[in-house]
Amino acid sequence: MAVVVELITGRTLDQGATVEEKLTEEYFKAVSYIELNQEDFKQLNLKEGDRVKVTTDFGEVVVFAKKAELPKGVVFIPMGPYANMVIDPATDGTGMPQFKGIKAKIEKTEEKVKTIKELLEAI
Amino acid sequence: MQDIVCTFCGSVCDDGEYDLKKKSVKKFCKLGSSKFAEKERIKAPMIDGKEVSYEEAIDKAVEILVNAKRPLLYGWASTANEAIRLGVILAEKLGGVYDQCASVCHAPGTLATIEEGVPGGTLGSVKNRADVVVFWGSNPMEAHPRHGMRYSISAKGLLVKDRKQRKVIVVDVRPTKTAKIADIFIQIKPGYDYAIFSALRAIISGNADAVPSEVGGVAKEKLIELADIMKNAKYGAILYGLGVTQSRGRDRNVENAIKLVQLLNRTTRWIIWPMRGHYNVVGAGEVPAWEVGYQYAIDFSRGYPRFSPAEFSAVEVLKRRDCDAALIVASDPVAHFPRIAVQHLKRIPVIQIDPYPNMTTLVAKIVIPSAVYGIEAEGTAYRMDCIPLRLKKIIETNYWTDEKILEEMLRRVEKFKG
C-alpha cells in the first residue's frame, strides 16, 4: 500500500532550536519525521512512530511518521538532511532548488531510519 | 547585562537580558534562548581530524585555496559584516565564487527586486502603521517567534495601537501556528501562489470577470473579499516567506507579488518584504553588493565580478562539479543542500570556519573553530529590514573571530597572489 502525495519542507521551532547542535539526538528527532494528514495516515495503516519510505524522482529516505493538521495529499518534512534526500535539485536558473511541492510516494516500511552519520555516508 | 542583541534569526531582537552567572538569556524566544545556551563546540583547529594550532590550520587552508582552480566560498549568513567584507575580497583574490545562504532561501526575491524594484519599509513602519498584515508562505510563530509581538501581530504601535486595530491574514498551504492566530486564513494549493497573485491583480484592476470561480483551491468570492481588504487598508504589508520562494515559480512568484503591491499603491499604501532567516543573511548580500555590485552567485575567475545564479550559485557550481575546493563560513551546506550538491562537497577538500560542529564538519578536511558573534565577539549585522545593528560581546573567549581568521588567510593569500 502506498499513497502519492505532494511533499513540502520547511522550518519548525524544534528544528531551529537544535540547528546549531546537528550531531545531537535532539536535532535527529527534530528533522527525521514526516507529517501526514489523518486520512493518509489511516490509509497507510500507520501508528504514531511507525516508519515510512518516501520516494521521489530524486531519491528515497526512511523517516518516522506523525499525524498532523494538513490537507489530504500534502505531507511535510522539516528542512534538513532527511528532506534533502528527496527534494528536486533543479533550480530553473535561479540557484534555488525546489524544496517545496515535489511529487512523492509514501509507503510503510520496516527499514530503519538512518542516523545523521549513516545518512551522510549514503549520500 | 541589558539590551543584548540576538544573533539567531533575521528579527535580531535587541532587548535581551544576559545573566552572566547562570549563562542564560531572558526575554528571548526558544530560538534565541537556544542560541545563548551552552552547547558543544569545536574544541580546536583540526587538519584531517588532528588538532593543530590556528596558524597551522590557516597555512594549510591557504595552500589548498591558492592551488585550487576555482574555489567556492560559501555561507556568510551567520557572521558579522566585517568578516563578510574580507570573504568577498578573499574570493576576488582567489578568483573563486562567492555565494551565500540566500541562494537556497530568499535569493529569488532578490531576482524579483532586480526586475521590479521593491516597495519596502522597515519593521518600525509595520509596527507603527500597518493595519493589515499578510503573512504569505511565512510562519513567524515558528521561524521568527517574537516578530509578531514586536512588529507585526500584537505589537503596539504609534498609529496602530494594538491587535484589535490590526487585521492579520495568513496565506499558506497548511494551517500553520501563525494561521491559528490570524483573523483570516486562506489555504491555497501548493505551487499556486503565482496564479493567486494574478487573480488578485485582475480583481483589483477591475477585471474580476476574467477570474474563474476558483483559483489554486480558493473560491473567487474569497479572493474578492481579500482584494477588498487590501484596497481598503491604510497601510498594508505583505511579509512573505519560503513558501513563495521555494515553490514552483520562485522568483516569478515574488515578481507577481511586487506587481500586486505596485497596483495597490495607486490608491493606498502597501509594502512587501521578505521574512529573512539567519540573523545576518541580509549582510551576506548587502556587503558584496556594496563591495562588487552583486548580492550572491558571484564569479571572480576572470578577474572581475560576474553575476549569474544559473551558473555561479553554490548548488549549480556543485552540481556541475565546477569547484575544486570549498571554504564554508558560518553555514552547513551538507545539511541544507540537495543530495547531488553534497556529493561534490564530499569529493573536494572542504575548509570550515564555524563555532559549532555540524554535518559539514564531518566532511571537512580543515576545521577552524570561531567565536560566536553577539556572545563572544562584537561586530555589525543587518536586521531583516536592512537596519544595521551593533552586536555585543558579553563574555571573553580564546576562540578567534571569523574576522581575525579571514584577515590572516587574506594576508597569506596576498603573499602568494599579490
Image (cartoon, coloured by chain):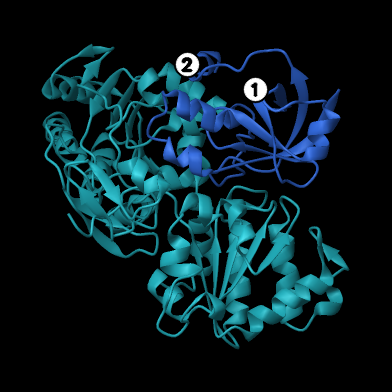
Bin the neighbour count of mark 1 within 10 Å (Cα to Cα): few under 14, some 14-19, many 20 and up: many
* Percent x, y of residue A119: 54, 18
Q: Quadrant of residue B123?
A: bottom left
Which of marks 1 and 2 precedes in the sequence? 1
Look at label 1 and name its amino acid.
Val
User: Residue A104 vs residue B109: left or right?
Assistant: right
* Percent x, y of residue B31: 40, 46
Colour chosen for chain A: blue
Farthest residue toward the bottom? B267
Q: Among the chains, which one is cyan?
A: B
Which residue is tagged 2? A117
User: Residue A103 vs residue A76: left or right?
Assistant: right
Residue at screen point 62% across, 65% down: B182
* Percent x, y of residue B241: 55, 55
Residue at screen point 65% across, 69% down: B183
Look at label 2 and name its amino acid.
Lys
Residue at screen point 41% across, 23% down: A23
Which residue is tagged 1? A61
- Tell me if residue B159 comes above or below residue B324 in the rendering: below
